Amino acid sequence: MEKIRIENLSLVFGKAKSKALKLLENGKNKAEILDATGCTVAVQHANLSINEGEIFVIMGLSGSGKSTLLRCLNRLINPTTGKIFINNQEITNMKERELLNIRRKELAMVFQHFGLLPHRTVLSNVAFGQELQAVPKAEREAQAMETIELVGLKGYEQQKVSELSGGMQQRVGLARGLANKPEVLLMDEAFSALDPLIRSQMQDELLILQEKMKKTIVFITHDLDEAIKLGDRIAIMKDGEIVQIGTSEEIITNPANDYIKSFVENVDRSKIVTAGSIMFAKPKVARLKKDGPAGVLRIMRESGTEHLPVVRNNRTFLGYVKLEDVLGLKNEGAKTIDGIIREDVMSITADTTIENMLPLLSKTNLPIPVVNEENHLLGVVSPTSIIAESTGMAKTEIHEIIQKAIEL
Amino acid sequence: MIIGQYIEDAINWMTANFTGFFDAINTGMSSLISVIESFWLWLPFYLTIGLFAALAWWKAGKSNAILTVAGLLFIYFAGFWDETMQTFALVLASAFIALLFGIPLGIWSAKNETAQKIIRPVLDFMQTMPAFVYLIPAVLFFGLGTVPGAFATIIFAMPPVVRLTSLGIKQVPEEIVEATKAFGATPRQLLLKVQLPLAMPTILAGVNQTMMMALSMVVIASMIGAKGLGEIVLQGISQLRIGLGFESGLAVVLLAIILDRITQNLGKSSKKK
């Protein structure tokens, strides 16, 4: 279900806003508009739909407009044009009072440098959101204690936040965000200021928390690895524009342009790319009962292969037949291929990552069959394409290497 | 000079047309000052010294408490007690009024760009204009005496607290302000719960500066009849009595040091608490 919708949102900083906006409508780019009007276009024509319960990552380098876009969601910054809906309720035309209410009840935010009140204790920082709503002290502190426990800060509640380490402070920031029981959590580079080890730990904990809470999280980062680790879906921004939206796998296997291609180049693909996207769908098959040895030989000849997967009823995967066995069978004059099916074949599902396919290569040189839960054959993944995907080499190069190895 | 002519005309016009207004201020200020003054003159000197010493001990530690006692005893035995209390009362009253206007002005100029653009040059003007110049309109508005002295002192002492209040509020990290807004704070909650508490050390530094400026001006204000230590300094000058001038000058210095030590640490100890 859709939780947040951004429609054609643009944001211009500067004095000659309307002129800049007009130029933007006429398709001028950021640099041209800056030259002509002195205005900076921070976000242009953003369209987004964020689903309930997903972690939606907005990724981009600094200056790409990602943090600005996030701040439009709770209107810390007002967009120049465009609309934002949360729960189908328009945020962009709200009066001050309604807006305060939305900020208090539905949206919470976690900041890069935590944004905590250094002169207060952990407890009163976490209870701060409710303090603003004038919830009685005992009640808000009881609730704050619950959240403090949730983020693993029990025992620290009476400490001043300025005495805590960065990782601890961000836990306080997260607890403060959660204490209001918001539906949407806005996280602005929330882990970027932390040490790598702590950062990765916090990412893990966020994922565990999210399992329980199922909040809608909008997460801003400049770190692709973080985006891939956390994001159910990712939007990549450049110069104020959303360049591509998709799952990490969609973006990596099918980058929208050269910018994204260069961006995702150094990603460890083997952890992200799955069998589903590299398999050869609808491979040639031998049909049990329908294809006899002669038929199977013909299919093999036509497709130039020495092995075929065997299916029953056009779908269910049984195993492989090899050319040498089929030839032997034909010489014996058999009518069916029942006896020669090799059933000791490992099959995988479509969401198996390359990383998990690699060990299979040592056990077989046959294409690896991809099946669904009912053991229906969806496609095959050739060993060559697994190596090609994980090394980034071209398939022909791999063939040459294999040939050389065989000759030796 | 033409500008001088205009200013003179304006001041004369104000004196002629706002007599009632200035009289009202005159009455209000003189009663405020006389209440404070009569309290400190009524309080026996040993109690005053005890009070100051306790305050200094609490805020600035043992050694400053000893310094305070020694300094005040010197003043008492030099025979300047009453004048010192008059000066102190005038400093308190002027600083109080300067803070009363200065802190809100500082908040305003931190929050409003236009206000800042107007207030800043005015503050520059107030601070760099030779202090004696304020004495002239003060006399025209209020006649001779303590009130015009306080008036000139307020103008002279106000800029630091305005500037430092404004600075303190602007120094609150943007992210903390954003976070506060993001959780649905009203502008009033933002100011009271976040900006002012975080700006407090800087604001208190401004309070300290304002007190010091007020003290230095109060002495000068004796030229137009403000009572206190300045009178004696003036006597020393006009009668060329080096000893008297030096002694009374020393009393001013001691009072300044004591007030400075106590107010300087206001912010620090409230942090520790």
Image: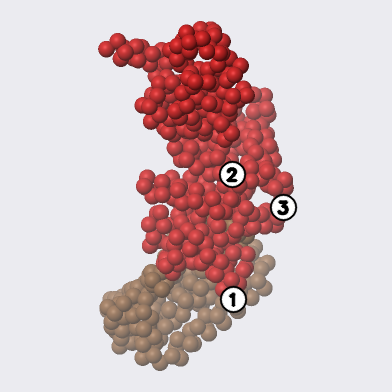
Nearer to me, A337 or A219: A337
**Residue A331 located left or right of residue A183:** left
Q: Which residue is mark 2?
A: A54
- The amino acid type of the residue labelled 3 equals Lys
Crowdedness of circle 3 by 10 Å Cα count: few (<14), some, many (20+)? Answer: few
> SS for tag 1?
helix
> SS for tag 2?
loop
Q: Can residue A402 be seen in this snapshot?
A: yes
Say which mark, if any, is on residue B71: none
Image coords of residue B23 (percent x, y):
63, 75
Q: Which is in the foreground here, disc 3 or disc 1?
A: 3
Q: Please name the residue shown 45% across and 75% down the image.
A: B91
Image coords of residue B57 (percent x, y):
33, 80
Marks 2 and 1 belong to one chain: no
Nearer to me, A237 or A402: A402
Report, in whole angstroms, how far the alpha carbon at label 2 lies from the one at label 1: 69 Å
Indicate the chain coloured red by its letter: A
Determine the image quadrant of residue B238. Answer: bottom left
Image coords of residue A37 (percent x, y):
60, 30
Nearer to me, A158 or B246: A158
Q: Which residue is mark 3?
A: A95
Q: Can residue B108 be seen in this snapshot?
A: no
Q: Please name the residue shown 36% across and 91% down the image.
A: B46
Q: Which residue is mark 1?
A: B26
* Chain B as rendered: colour: brown
Asked whether the beta carbons under mark 3 and mark 1 sit within 8 Å of each other, the answer is: no
The residue marked by circle 3 belongs to what chain?
A
Report, in whole angstroms, how far the alpha carbon at label 3 lies from the one at label 2: 28 Å
Q: Please name the residue shown 57% across and 47% down the image.
A: A217
Q: Earlier in the sequence, mark 3 or mark 2?
A: 2
Determine the image quadrant of residue B241. Answer: bottom left
**Residue B262 located left or right of residue A140:** left
